[in-house]
Amino acid sequence: MPTDEEWRKQLIDLIHQGEAKGQNIVNYGGEVVGFGQRVSDLGLASADVLNYVLPSRTDLERMTQAWQYVNKQEDEILHAIMPVSMASTATSGYAANYSMTVLANPDVVGFVPPDKQNEARQAVVRLSSVIDSQAEKNKVLSLFGEYGLNTAAAGRESPRDLFQTAYAAFEKPVAVNVSASGSLIPMRECINAVVAELIRRRPMQEEAKAQRDKILSICRQCAGRGVTDAAIQSMASRWDGLVNELSGAKDKQYSRDQWREALRRATLFLIELLQSLDRSKMK
């Protein structure tokens, strides 16, 4: 079993590979430019933080898996094995961003030796800025429009309304000590509403009671070209953990940084899920 330090070295190496390949992809032009630039930016900022911070074994393994997926996708692009599927680039790119959110929290600086904290803090700020540029609210709202998720049945709130409520509570708190539950619970309900609608639109109805089973069923029936089963499994596992995290807001005190981190993860998950699907396969 690799040690944490061995995991970190492997992860930093993968990130640098991804960063370099991302820059090569930028030079090719076309639709993949955005993907390449995002991965390159994320790689540079992530490796900078990892030079100071040693996450837990669990986080390191999850991050490493995400970057292995990114590097594989970049190899396919660079080697021109097949026409590139933007659905598969979305799943790999946003999965990598999701995995790095834990390093974009200023709290990690507290685990760095005092003489390195200033540099670590600057690295965290850079990574935070890169992830924020990709966990873009307007991208989610645009996808909601494409999927017809801006309206709801009478007496219910639409995914769009719930999403905006979640961010409004964070951005314009009514009191200094406002609870994060007023934001994270609506975000949970937003994603639940999205998942419920996608479940309804599957071409074949099948039992899917557990949270992860719903994602597996939606994606296996409606995934875009190039989205692998490993990517689908990863999304299902992350939603399983994310729904528990968002639900736990009722019983936990969140700092502003922790609150922001949870919103980032939820936003990245929504973008990844919706961009990984092929709407032509749905009812």
Image: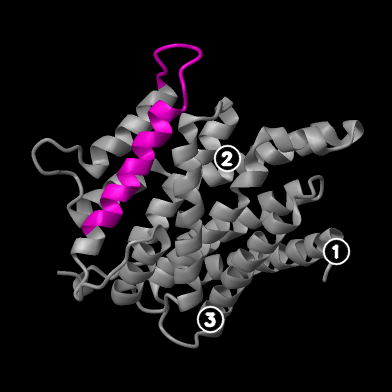
- Camera-side mark, 3 or 1: 1
Q: Quadrant of the C terminus?
A: bottom left
Q: Which residue is mark 3?
A: 76
Q: Which residue is mark 1?
A: 3
As drawn, the residue found furthest toward the left would be: 154
Provide the major secondary structure of the magenta segment: helix
Task: Give the camera-side residue of 122 and 231.
Answer: 231
Identify residue type, mark 1: Thr
Q: Residue at x 59, y 30 (%)?
A: 257
Tell me the CA gap for discs 3 and 1. Answer: 30 Å
Residue 206's place in the image compared with 195, above or below, is below
| Disc with the residue nearer the chain's start (2 vs 1) | 1
Identify residue type, mark 2: Ser
Residue 26 in which image quadrant: bottom right
Looking at the rendered structure, the secondary structure element under dot 3 is helix
Tell me, yes or no, if residue 24 can be seen here: no
Identify residue type, mark 3: Glu
Mark 2 crowdedness (10 Å alpha carbons): few <14, some 14-19, many ≥20: some
Q: Which residues are magenta?
A: 172-197
Mark 3 crowdedness (10 Å alpha carbons): few <14, some 14-19, many ≥20: few
Looking at the rendered structure, the secondary structure element under dot 1 is loop
Q: Are marks 3 and 1 in contact (CB under 8 Å)?
A: no
Residue 196's place in the image compared with 165, above or below, is below
Q: Are marks 2 and 1 in contact (CB under 8 Å)?
A: no
Q: Residue at x 38, y 66 (%)?
A: 213
Query: With 111 as the anchor, is 138 left or right in this view?
Result: left
Q: Which residue is mark 2?
A: 129
Query: With 273 as the anchor, is 61 left or right in this view?
Result: right
Task: Give the camera-side residue of 207 and 110.
Answer: 207
